[in-house]
Image (tube, grey):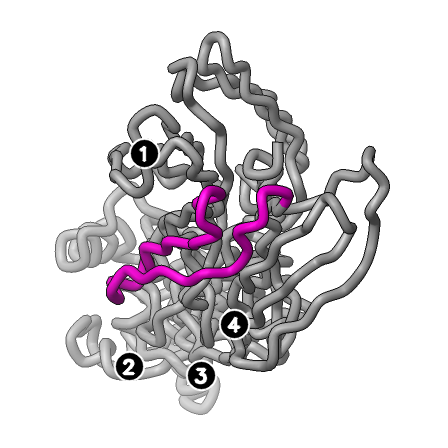
């Protein structure tokens, strides 16, 4: 009989252990909520300590830990009851269940993406350089791409990020340039950069002198200058909306083309033959300005990049003497050179020797001869091409040969 009573005692004690917390469910829950501020949260329910969401179900690992520690919350906090890698306190703070290994805090993503490939051409004749490859990877996922000219990492909130990798980049000036490629993820991690270098040499003096490229895409735009009103009407080759602007209008104004500020876009400009004044309206939005250079009644405007700094220089050809007067944009001293002077000569400057500097040249209408003075210092030479009385040289300075 004593043995039976002893066995019954063990059974009753075990039952009490399993459901012990249930006896004080409301009180324990209130204490828990008060300590951790969890009232009304997902943890404010019986399944916090039980395997089922009832106050009479078996205890889960966290409930067991509490029971074994005499319902001492502080003692249970450093324990990882469900062996999921997080302490009970960490789980409670994250509002996940400390007694369920499948419920645990989300691990913070601290791994930045990696730019796996980034290439651009080593040389370019345009300020707009294609990006031939740009790929990145991340342990979760890449959410942004950016290219910059600075080696300093951009912040994840900086402007300029795009959801897809860019396919081109437009520089403001020519020269040797380095681009840096970056990637970011949803957690705000920014990659280290991968860089590539390009040397931009803008043929035609870097100023679109042999074309009118108002939008800077490397293609000639259709444009007209309406001399009776001074209106410019431009049809961009890039597909942008046509536009009209007023610049000039004096009866003696002659439209001239050039990139006078070196931004890779043609500026609106006129040469006022009556006074020898040049009026320039920068395409980049800078302040319009005027400069006096020329003024003789026989002067013809022949702007171009004579010093190879990728900016258009002011220049005139004085037909009465065959003198060329050039005002370098680089700040070097103005100078004059004699080349031509025959009454039949028409100024036809251009890039005849491919050294990125304008060469002086004239076309002699009476004979069809072209006389060229290379800027490189090579020997002057002449070429016969044309000579018919109806022939007109096709030049980058059409206004000068009218």
Give the label on residue 375, or none: 4
Left-right relation of 331 to 186: left
- Between the residue at mark 1 and the residue at mark 4, the CA separation in whole angstroms equals 25 Å
Tag in front: 2 or 4:
4
Secondary structure mostly seen in the magenta stretch: loop
Q: Is residue 182 left or right of residue 92?
A: right
* 10 Å crowding of disc 1: few (<14), some (14-19), many (20+): many
> Foreground mark, 3 or 1?
1
Could you tell me which secondary element the residue under label 1 belongs to? loop
Residue at 50% of width from left, 63% of height from top? 51
- Res. 68 mark: 2
Q: Secondary structure at mark 3?
A: loop
Q: Earlier in the sequence, mark 3 or mark 2?
A: 2
SS of the residue under disc 2: helix
Q: Position of residue 174 (x, y in %)?
A: 46, 65
What's the magenta region? 318-344
Vertical placement of 344 versus 80: above or below? above
- Image quadrant for the N terminus? bottom left
Upstream in the sequence, badge 3 or badge 4? 3
Magenta span contains residue 188:
no
For image coordinates 54% across by 15% down, the residue present is 226
Residue labelled with disc 3: 83
Gap in angstroms between the C-alphas marked 2 and 1? 100 Å
Name the residue that disc number 1 marks.
276
Q: Residues within 10 Å of mark 2 (few under 14, many from 20)?
A: few
Q: Nearer the viewer, residue 264 or 67?
A: 264
């Amino acid at each position: 009989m004593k043995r039976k009573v002893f066995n019954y005692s063990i059974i009753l004690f075990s039952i009490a252990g399993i459901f012990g917390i249930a006896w004080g469910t409301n009180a324990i829950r209130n204490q828990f909520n008060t300590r951790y501020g969890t009232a009304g949260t997902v943890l404010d329910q019986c399944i916090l300590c039980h395997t089922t969401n009832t106050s009479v179900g078996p205890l889960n690992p966290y409930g067991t830990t509490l029971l074994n520690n005499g319902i001492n919350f502080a003692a249970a906090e450093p324990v990882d009851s469900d062996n999921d890698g997080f302490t009970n306190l960490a789980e409670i703070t994250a509002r996940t269940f400390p007694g369920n290994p499948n419920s645990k805090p989300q691990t913070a993503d601290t791994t930045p993406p990696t730019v796996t490939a980034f290439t651009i051409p080593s040389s370019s004749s345009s300020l707009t350089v294609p990006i031939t490859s740009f790929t990145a990877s991340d342990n979760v996922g890449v959410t942004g791409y950016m290219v910059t000219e600075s080696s300093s990492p951009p912040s994840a909130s900086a402007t300029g990020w795009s959801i897809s990798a860019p396919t081109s980049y437009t520089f403001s000036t020519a020269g040797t340039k380095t681009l840096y490629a970056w990637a970011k993820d949803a957690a705000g991690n920014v990659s280290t950069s991968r860089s590539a270098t390009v040397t931009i040499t803008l043929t035609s003096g870097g100023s679109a002198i042999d074309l009118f490229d108002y939008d800077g895409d490397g293609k000639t735009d259709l444009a007209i200058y309406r001399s009776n009103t001074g209106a410019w009407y431009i049809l961009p080759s890039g597909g942008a909306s046509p536009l009209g602007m007023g610049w000039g209008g004096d009866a003696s104004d002659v439209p001239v083309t050039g990139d006078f500020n070196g931004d890779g876009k043609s500026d609106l400009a006129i040469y006022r033959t009556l006074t020898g004044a040049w009026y320039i309206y920068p395409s980049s939005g800078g302040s319009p300005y005027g400069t006096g250079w020329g003024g003789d009644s026989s002067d013809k405007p022949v702007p171009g990049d004579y010093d190879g700094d990728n900016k258009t220089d002011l220049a005139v050809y004085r037909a009465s003497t065959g003198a060329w007067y050039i005002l370098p944009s680089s700040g070097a001293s103005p100078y004059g050179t004699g080349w031509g002077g025959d009454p039949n000569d028409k100024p036809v400057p251009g890039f005849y020797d491919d050294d990125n500097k304008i060469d002086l040249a004239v076309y002699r209408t009476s004979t069809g001869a072209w006389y060229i003075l290379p800027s490189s210092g090579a020997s002057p030479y002449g070429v016969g091409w044309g000579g018919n009385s109806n022939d007109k040289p096709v030049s980058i300075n059409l206004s000068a040969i009218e």
